Amino acid sequence: MFIFKTVIWGSIFLLAALIVGPWLALQFDASFPQIHLGPFKYIGAVLFGIGFLFTVYCAFILFTPGKSRPAPYDAGGAFTIEGPYRYVRNPFMLGVVVALWGEAIFMERVLMMIYALIITWVIHFWVIFFEEPALEERFGGEYDEYRKAVPRWFPHFRRYEK
């Protein structure tokens, strides 16, 4: 039941952040100028694709049965780290942010850029004020060691070994 609920909430978050939010932002777009990026706008499409696929991959890692995950709402046992979580603490959210900025760049809209900035800050503060304290409370020193060794947003190329 946990995995089902988590997949539902994760899907709702992705739908809201990448589809509903941008749609709402574009409803008020008429009073803002368009940014013309020329062929550079296609970098946004590439970023969107990379971010979306990365997010799906991280979701698969988080919700694969049989292992505990670095998520504060998971009721599993031991703290374990797999895949990109060895290089960056929040790869799922990083994927969402990259996809959102890719979407904003591709659309060439000022309001989409503002929306992407707001959602980026919301995610950042969610991680700092909710997710990290919950993980520290749940896993204690084990998570603290991980947090000191692995960066929050910008991956390093040193693999974290527990």
Image (cartoon, rainbow, N blue to C red):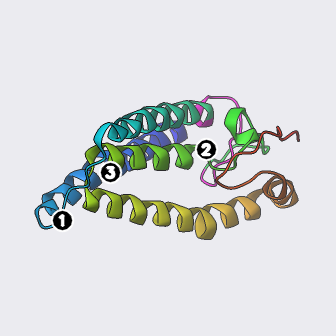
Whether the residues at callouts 2 and 1 have beta carbons within 8 Å, the answer is no
Label 2 packing within 10 angstroms: few (<14), some (14-19), many (20+)? many
Tag of residue 32:
1
| For residue 51, side relative to residue 35 (left or right) | right
On screen, 71 above or below 81? below
Whether the residues at callouts 1 and 3 have beta carbons within 8 Å, the answer is no
Dot in front, 2 or 1? 1
Label 1 packing within 10 angstroms: few (<14), some (14-19), many (20+)? few
Q: Which residues are magenta?
A: 62-73
Residue receiving disc 2: 91
Residue 10 x, y percent position in the rendering: 45, 44
Q: What secondary structure prevails in the magenta region?
A: loop
Residue 20 forms part of the magenta stretch: no
The residue at 53%/41% (across/down) is: 2
Dot in front, 1 or 3? 1
Dot in front, 3 or 2? 2
- Name the one closer to the observer, 116 or 72: 116
| For residue 98, side relative to residue 116 (left or right) | right
Residue 37 x, y percent position in the rendering: 31, 47
First-in-chain label (3 vs 2): 3
The residue at 34%/59% (across/down) is: 113
Residue 59 picture quarter: top right
